[in-house]
Image: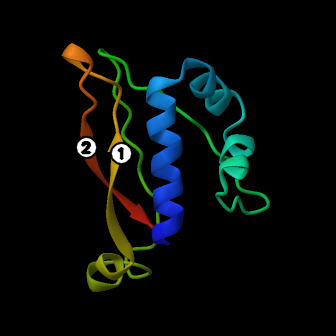
Amino acid sequence: MTAHKDTLMDVLQRATTDPAYRASLKADPAGVLTAAGVDVPEGIRYTVVENTPDQVHIVLPPLTEEDELGGEALEARATKTTLLCPPGPGGMVTIMPVCIIA
């Protein structure tokens, strides 16, 4: 899982500095991820959204039955990582914590 997260971070980091790569990622996320070495399962669709100064996206995990996954089970499956955000004032790249449910 760590190699997958590292590869995804490389994709996200490159997309913050390379406009053509960013456009490709937005147009064909599965193709760009596959080319970068990320395993893209059959039948899974990817959507890339872009935060702007006046629009921030919050991504929720799929809705589950309350007793299906919660408490310790949810905590055990959740891993913390970081998501690169667009450069801010002075060109500084910031990070924000997100939780990926595997």
Q: Choose top left, top right, bottom left or bottom right for residue 90.
A: top left
The foreground one among 76 and 71 is 76
Q: Amino acid at mark 2?
A: Met
- Residue 40, picture quadrant: bottom right
- Dot 2 corresponds to which residue? 96
Q: Is residue 56 left or right of residue 27?
A: left
Q: Single out the residue that lies furthest toward the right.
A: 42
Q: Residues within 10 Å of mark 2 (few under 14, many from 20)?
A: few
Considering the numbered disc 1 on the image, is that residue within a helix, a strand or a loop?
Answer: strand
Residue 38 % position (x, y): 64, 58
Name the quadrant containing residue 37: bottom right
* Three-letter code, disc 1: Leu
| Foreground residue among 84 and 58 | 84
Q: Are marks 2 and 1 in contact (CB under 8 Å)?
A: yes
Q: Who's the residue at 41% across and 61% down the image?
A: 100
Q: Earlier in the sequence, mark 2 or mark 1?
A: 1
In the picture of the structure, the residue carrying the numbered disc 1 is 83
